[in-house]
Structure formats: C-alpha cells, structure tokens
Amino acid sequence: MSKLGWIIAGVLVVGSGALLWQVMRPAPSQTGHSMTPPDMSGIAEGAPIVEVKLPDNLASLAQMGERAFNAKCAVCHGANAAGREGKGPPLVHKIYEPNHHSDMAFVMAAKNGVRSHHWRFGNMPPVDGVTDADVKAITAYVRALQKENGVF
C-alpha cells in the first residue's frame, strides 16, 4: 500500500472511532451534567428556586463570604444562594460547578457584570463595593454550599 493509502486509511479509522464515540456516549440527561436550568413554572415570585442544605461548619473564609454574600448577593441570588424566582439564579446548581464556572468567573461577574446566558433573569450588573478579596470569600462560601449539596 502506498503512503497516501496509509494516510487515507488512518484518517478513516480515526474518523470512524470519533463517530462511534459520539454515538455511544450517554446523553447529558443521563450523566447529570446538562446545563439546562430547572423548570420554575410553579415557583412563586421571589421564592427560593432550589432547596439548599447548609454545611455543619464553614471555614473562616467561607464565614466571611457568607456575611458578604448576605450583604451584596442575597437580594438577587437568595438566602444561601438558593436563587429567587424573578430575581436571580441559584448558585447552588450544577451550572455553577467549578468545571463550568471557575472561581475567577465569580470575580469577573462581580467586577464586570454578566450577560444572561443560562437563565432568563436578564443580565447581571456589576456589583458595587466588593473587592476581589470579598468575592474570593463569597466564592468560598458558595463552593462550601455546593459541596454540601452534591454539586461537585
């Protein structure tokens, strides 16, 4: 077989393998990693969107983050980051797992705001009066809540 024949055969094998992998892998709904927000049609305006189990203990950084979250974030994202229907999404949700939204994503969101891209709440404006250190603490609090609730 010529060199060109080997190249063509190699491309066909790799392409067939990639196609087979795509066909055989489970759908996102079967793996639990879909980034689709939950159905919120039966939730009253301002009510929590998800139920959040609180950790027994928070590290000191997460405790500081809880205070900052309550002062700056809870008005939209709800108590314990459970979200508020009509106001803002829950941060205790697989959409915000560290593999999809890194800690730096929280810093950038607070600093610059965020265009709506997963939820129907509209764009998030920048948060006035929070420092990068505040957001680092808030993120530690949110990650502690996420971990307690099986988000990661």
Image: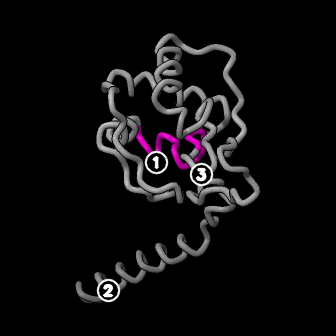
Residue at 62% in and 30% down: 80
Quadrant assignment, res 40: bottom right
Q: Which residue is drawn at 47% across and 80% down?
A: 16
Q: Given this view, does label 1 or label 2 mark the residue nearer the observer?
A: 1
Residue 77 image point, x, y percent: 55, 39
Which SS class for mark 3?
Answer: loop
Residue 35 colored in magenta in the image? no
Q: Residue 52: x, y in percent?
A: 69, 34
The residue at the far right in this view is 42
For the C terminus, which image quadrant?
Answer: top right
Q: Is residue 54 above or below residue 125?
A: above
Amino acid at circle 3 = Gly
Report crowding for label 3: few under 14, some 14 to 19, many 20 or more residues within 10 A (C-alpha): some
| Distance from Cα at disc 3 to Cα at disc 2 | 55 Å
- Mark 3 lies on residue: 86
Callout 2 crowding tier (Cα within 10 Å): few <14, some 14–19, many ≥20: few
Residue 8 has which mark? Answer: 2
Q: What stretch is highlighted in magenta?
A: 90-102
Q: Residue furthest left?
A: 3
| Residue 74 spot, x, y in % from top left | 54, 32
* Left/right of residue 106 with respect to residue 141 in the rendered view: left
Magenta span: chief secondary structure: loop
Amino acid at dot 1: His
Outermost residue to the front: 45
Give the SS element for disc 2. helix
Q: How far apart are marks 1 and 2 (CA)?
A: 37 Å
Contact (CB < 8 A) between labels 3 and 1? no
> Could you tell me which secondary element the residue under label 1 belongs to?
loop
Q: Earlier in the sequence, mark 3 or mark 2?
A: 2
**Residue 99 counted in the magenta span:** yes
| Residue 100 circle label | 1
Q: Residue 30: which numbered mark, if any? A: none
